[in-house]
Amino acid sequence: MMSRRPLLVALLIGALVPCAAPAQLLGGPLGSVTGPVIDTVGQVGNGVEQALGGIAQPGDRPGSVVYSNVAPVSLDRVVQPIQYVRATAGELAQLRKMRLEALIRANRALLDRDDQGQPVRKGELILTDPDPALLALATRAGFRVIGDDGDELGIRIATLSVPRGMTVREGLKVLRRVIPATAVDYNHIYEPAGGTLLPASGAALAVSAPIRQGTRIAMIDGGVASHPSLGSASIEQRGFAGAAQPTGHGTAVGSLLVGDQGPFRGAARGAQLFVGDVYGGNPAAGSATAIVRALAWAASKRPSVINISLVGPNNRAMARAIAVLRSRGIGLVAAVGNDGPAAPPQYPASYDGVIAVTGVDASDRALREAGRATHLDFAAPGADLVAALPGKGFTPVRGTSFAAPFVAARLAATGSRAQLTAEAVPGRGKVGRGIICRTCRILPKTVGLR
């Protein structure tokens, strides 16, 4: 068996090699390699095998090629995924940095980086709730208003382009000298909790059944694909980075909420599901402005809970939107990510009032690769379970992305954090107040998978 460290080094090198090969969906007939959908060390949480860790699964054939969004990685032997789960905190943090760098390099025309290496929209800065005087000061300094939008939340965001020849980092410094620093920020990019997002090749977007009265849950993610388990679900989708597009990650999360097919049963069956797609099938999307617009749309649907299985940095526009949603009594649940305890705290899970969720395996042990937030509220099944594949079939999944919807479902059902605390059961390791929806896990063998 290949040792962990040589393969991790190989992955770091491979991550920086641009490649035009399309990423392939794993776990069934839509993909070139069968195996679990891992949302972990360089995960596959969207149904994609990433070059940055977790790349081989039991049963992979010698010489098989696993495609990432960055580069193909050739495997010359069988490697068990547990090796990547055992990566050290430092290795996980390094893999995170390399993954973000790879995303930026693969999308140079769209992305730049902030001063911490986090992907941001290239040449764009955003002002939250600016008054005319601030915009006038910005334009006199050479910045141009390219977007000025209000929304259902009562938040106004002005998007500015930086002057020609200036990087976005330089532009931020200049603009903060001109106007109050509290008003301006980067237009950050957010990832599905721990990795990139991929369109579900060949799958159609899930078509909504008539909206019924009852529980309303929203999710901010990629689009949800059609699937037999979702055939009778009430789903409404809206795109905020172009037209909504089906994705593996969004489909998995959606199925864990409202899926219902034979032994596979989502934790919020019968609920109305509103999906805000902030990617449009593009891993370089997922901007703070798109997410804020999606949150505003979701709020207009009057959900009791919004699930956000995405991670990124603190952002002024995002923080403002979260605060408004909290003031309206809408429950907010977010995953802590999968980049390990040495990674910086992730948002929106770290915002006050947001329920931060980690994952546990079938032994009730906290996932080693789970990231962190400034607070940890609950855990839920995040490994040794299955979710829907776009089109048909199911696949094993792993990661905090898939734990969050269980908590969101129970919050919608119970109506309060206090009730969640009352039903939480003890776990092993860092699980916050305990494990929620422990019995919601659908084991692979239940749907005929090994």
Image: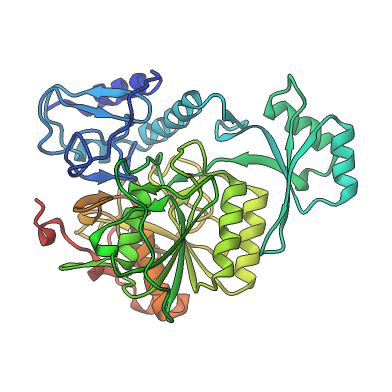
Q: How many marks?
A: 0
Residue 355, compared with residue 340, is above or below; it is below
Who's the residue at 26% across and 23% down the image?
73
Q: Quadrant of residue 43?
A: top left
**Taking 272 as reference, is 72 left or right?**
left
Q: Nearer the viewer, residue 33 or 210?
A: 210
Check the image and report above or below for 448 versus 54: below
The residue lying toward the viewer, choosing from 205 and 269, is: 205
Q: Position of residue 51 (x, y in %)?
A: 32, 29
The residue under the point 21% across, 51% down is: 396
Name the residue nearer the viewer: 297 or 73. 297
Q: Is residue 386 above or below residue 105?
A: below
Task: Establish if 232 lies above or below 283.
Answer: below
**Would residue 341 be visible to someone looking at this image?**
yes
- Quarter occupied by residue 71: top left
Q: Is residue 166 left or right of residue 26?
A: right
The colour scheme is rainbow
The residue that appears at 16% across and 26% down in the rendered structure is 64
Question: Residue 19: x and y, percent?
Answer: 37, 20
On the rendered structure, is 249 left or right of 105?
left
| Residue 314 visible, this angle | no
Residue 207 percent location from the top left of the image: 37, 61
In which quadrant is the N terminus drawn? top left
